[in-house]
Amino acid sequence: LLLLLSLSHLNTAALTVAVILEQGTPLQMIQLLQTPWEDRFRVCLDLVRLLHFLSRSPLGSVGLLDFQPRQFITVSGQLKLTDLDDVSAGEIACWTDADCTLKFPHRNFTVPCSTRGVCDGLNEKRNIYNAYRFFFTYLLPHQAPPGLTHLVDHIMNTTGELKADINQTLEAFEQILLLYKSGLHLDNLPSGNGEYRCWPSYSQQGCVLSVHSAREAAYICNSHSQCNSFTLTGQKTWTGEKLCLVSKTCL
Ligand SMILES: *[C@@H]1O[C@H](CO)[C@@H](O)[C@H](O)[C@H]1NC(C)=O
Ligand SMILES: *[C@@H]1O[C@H](CO)[C@@H](O)[C@H](O)[C@H]1NC(C)=O
Ligand SMILES: *[C@@H]1O[C@H](CO)[C@@H](O)[C@H](O)[C@H]1NC(C)=O
C-alpha cells in the first residue's frame, strides 16, 4: 500500500492520505453534528474526493472495508484516512452475478459479473453506499442552505440508490461547492421565512454565522424579529464565506 500512499501525494494537491500519525482529531460524529453545515459539507466533500482517488488508484479500485468514522481524522478541518489495514484492492473474482452482491443491513445490491470474471465497480459502489449511510445521511441534509436543498436531495437519492458512480457524485459535490462559493444559490431568496437559526453558531459567545454577502446577512437578520443588527467580522471560513455576527440574543 505504500505505492498508493506516496502516489496520492503526487496526484491530488487537495487530498492527502495520512501515512504517518499526524496531529489530528478523530472524527466524532456527535461533535460534527453540532457544527455548521458548511463544515459538515466539507467532510463529505473530502470523503468523496478520497473515494474518487481510490476508485482509480495505481492498485486498481480500492474498497474500504471498515468505514466507521473512527477510521478518519480531521486536520484543520480537513478529512484524512488514518488506517489502511482493512481495504480490498482490485476487483473481486466471480463466477456468477450472485458472487457480486453487496449486503447491507437494509439494502442488497448486485453488480454484473463481467466476462473477465470480476465484479466490475463493486469496490466503488461499496464505498459510495457506505459514504451515504455513515456520513451523508447524518451530515448533509440537516440545515443545508435552502437554495441548495434540491441538489443535496439529489445526491442523497443517487448515492442511497447507487444510481451515480463516483465521478458523477464528485461532480455533484463540486457543483454545490461552486454554487455555494459564488452565492448564486442566494439569487432567489424567499422573503422572510425563518429557515435560518443561530445554531450551530461559529462562536459560543454569540450568534456567528457564515454569509456570502452583506445582502445575505441582511436577509437573515430581516427574517427574524429578534435581530436588530449585524456585523461582518472580517473573518472567513474555509470556502471563503464571511463570518457575520448577528446581534441580539441567539435566534
Ligand atoms: C439481503 O440478502 C440476504 C440473503 O442473501 C437476505 O436474507 C436479506 O433479507 C436481504 N436483505 C434485503 C434488505 O433485501
Ligand atoms: C429515491 O427516490 C425515489 C423516488 O422518489 C424513492 O422512492 C426512494 O426511496 C429514494 N431513495 C433514497 C435512498 O432516498
Ligand atoms: C472518471 O473520471 C476519470 C478522470 O477523473 C476518468 O479517467 C474515468 O474514465 C471516469 N470514469 C467514468 C466511469 O466515467
Image (cartoon, grey):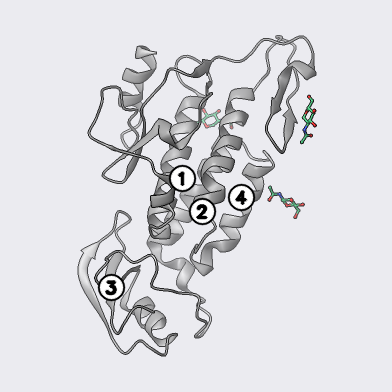
Is label 2's Cβ within 8 Å of ligand 2?
no
Residue 133 vertical position relative to residue 124 in the rendered view, above or below: below
Check mark 4 vs ligand 2: CB closer than 8 Å? yes or no.
yes
Residue at the image position 62 percent from the left and 42 percent from the top: 159
What is the spatial separation of the Cα atoms under label 4 and label 2, in whole angstroms?
Answer: 8 Å
The mark that comes first in sequence, 3 or 2, is: 2
Q: Do the residues labelled 4 and 2 touch (CB within 8 Å)?
A: yes
Does residue 106 sit above or below 38 in this rendering?
above
Find disc 4 in the rendering and name its residue: 156
Q: How many marks?
A: 4
Mark 3–mark 2 distance (CA, rounded to whole Å): 22 Å
Q: What residue type is labelled 3?
A: Cys
Helix, strand or loop at label 3? It is strand
Q: Which amino acid does label 4 sit on?
A: Met
Report how far apart the C-alphas of labels 3 and 1 lie in the structure: 24 Å
Residue denoted by label 1? 44
The residue at 52%/76% (across/down) is: 188
Crowding at label 1, few (<14), some or many (≥20) Cα neighbours within 10 Å?
some
For the residues bearing labels 2 and 1, Cβ distance under 8 angstroms: yes
